[in-house]
Image (spheres, grey):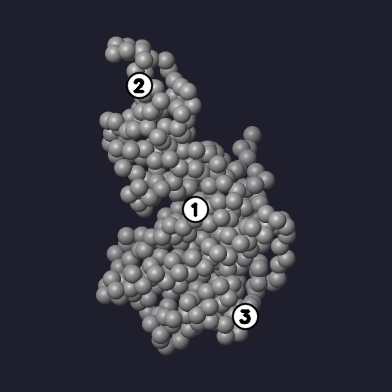
């Protein structure tokens, strides 16, 4: 019998590696599930349900000792497998403890992130997403974290929505020139790929640096199920820029977003450009936060009744993938679709 797909079958970032020390647990929420993270004696990350099975106290408020997690209420202690290894009230000679375990989750450390998967689906064997060019020679990464009061679908759509940039990010990222942009949008195997054409110098303040000769640039956007967007720019020779965002569903109206701004401008400009990239990137995100927070306020009052234009095919394809998961289906089995479209910015 085929197992239904759901959002818990995928890997989500729970925290950055640097946030998880060896001596203190860390509480997180993903898809409404309370988690506690800690490092075992070998420094490997572990994830349990943030609930002591003894008297229902949050384990994230406890302590880590010798790679084991101790509840602060009665001192019940769990090893890296979730097994109870000490019950202080039982005295010093605990030769035989009840075979009781905390609910544990799969946990992986990759690209300086800690990933957690809440449920494994044998029919959907996926791995955590690899951040493009992270720590690769010649590339520099600026990592950002932000909180949006909106859901994953709306956040992801915003990150690969070009038309809004000339209004929300006027001059910082793009300026309105009423230039026609042609694009191809493809939905296939649980992903959406958008290939833009005819873009040259409408890149905001740094057009003079990124593409001084105004030659056509390579611009591709991607959405990968269920929560990842990646934007790829290849400007003039030797200049590349990647914006990758992972939207983490805390609950239906709250999303934590980890964004990598990875670029290749040459050794000197990689060094000099990092603080500028951080400032500019965060400035753009701050503007998106205002828009997305307001969008959710309107949705709460009037519902998510969207009207689409031809330029919104990107949104339609992303929503079809998210909705398929919501229904228990595997988006990789959706019929492959390709659509040409155009818009003006």
Residue sitting nearer the eye, 242 or 85 = 85
Residue sitting nearer the eye, 72 or 54 = 72
Q: Is residue 38 left or right of residue 198?
A: left
Residue at (35%, 21%) from the top-left corner? 85
Residue at (63%, 40%) from the top-left corner? 4
**Marking on residue 344:** 3
Vertical order, 294 against 214 (above or below): above
Mark 1 vs mark 3, foreground winner is 1
Q: Position of residue 291 (x, y in %)?
A: 58, 65
Q: Secondary structure at mark 3?
A: strand
Crowding at mark 3 (Cα within 10 Å: few <14, some 14-19, many 20+) = few
Q: Secondary structure at mark 1?
A: strand
Vertical order, 53 against 230 (above or below): above
Instruction: Give me the C-alpha separation between circle 3 and circle 2.
Output: 64 Å
Instruction: Give me the C-alpha separation between circle 1 and circle 3.
Output: 31 Å
**Which residue is under mark 2?**
85
Q: Secondary structure at mark 2?
A: strand
Quadrant of res 268 = bottom left
Q: Is residue 188 visible?
A: no
**Which residue is under mark 1?**
256
Crowding at mark 1 (Cα within 10 Å: few <14, some 14-19, many 20+) = many
Residue sitting nearer the eye, 112 or 20 = 20
Dot 1 or dot 2, earlier in sequence: 2
Residue at (62%, 80%) from the top-left corner? 344
Mark 1 vs mark 2, foreground winner is 1
Residue at (29%, 74%) from the top-left corner? 272
Dot 1 or dot 3, earlier in sequence: 1
Dot 3 or dot 2, earlier in sequence: 2
Vertical order, 66 against 44 (above or below): above
């Amino acid at each position: 019998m085929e197992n239904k797909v759901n959002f818990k079958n995928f890997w989500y970032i729970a925290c950055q590696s640097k946030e998880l020390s060896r001596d203190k647990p860390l509480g997180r929420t993903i898809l409404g599930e309370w988690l506690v993270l800690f490092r075992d004696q070998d420094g490997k990350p572990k994830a349990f349900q943030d609930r002591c099975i003894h008297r229902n106290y949050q384990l994230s408020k406890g302590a880590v000792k010798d790679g084991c997690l101790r509840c602060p209420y009665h001192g019940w202690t769990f090893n890296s497998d979730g097994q109870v290894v000490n019950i202080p009230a039982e005295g010093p000679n605990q030769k035989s403890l009840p075979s009781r375990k905390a609910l544990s989750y799969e946990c992986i450390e990759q690209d300086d992130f800690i990933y957690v998967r809440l449920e494994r689906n044998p029919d959907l064997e996926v791995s955590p997403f690899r951040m493009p060019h992270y720590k690769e020679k010649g590339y520099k990464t600026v990592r950002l974290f932000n909180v949006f009061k909106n859901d994953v679908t709306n956040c992801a759509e915003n990150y690969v929505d070009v038309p809004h940039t000339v209004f929300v990010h006027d001059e910082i990222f793009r300026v309105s020139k009423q230039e026609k942009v042609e694009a191809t949008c493809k939905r296939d195997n649980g992903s959406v790929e958008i290939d833009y054409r005819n873009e040259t110098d409408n890149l905001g303040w740094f057009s003079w640096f990124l593409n001084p000769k105004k030659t056509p640039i390579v611009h591709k956007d991607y959405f990968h199920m269920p929560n990842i967007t990646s934007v790829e720019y290849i400007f003039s020779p030797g200049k590349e820029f990647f914006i990758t965002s992972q939207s983490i569903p805390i609950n239906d109206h709250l999303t934590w977003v980890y964004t990598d701004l990875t670029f290749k401008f040459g050794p000197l400009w990689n060094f000099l450009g990092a603080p500028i990239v951080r400032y500019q990137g965060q400035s753009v995100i701050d503007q998106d936060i205002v828009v997305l927070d307001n969008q959710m306020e309107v949705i709460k009052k009037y519902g998510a009744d969207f009207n689409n234009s031809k330029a919104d095919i990107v949104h339609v394809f992303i929503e079809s993938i998210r909705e398929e998961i919501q229904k228990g289906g595997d988006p990789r089995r959706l019929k492959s679709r390709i659509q040409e479209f155009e818009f003006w910015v």
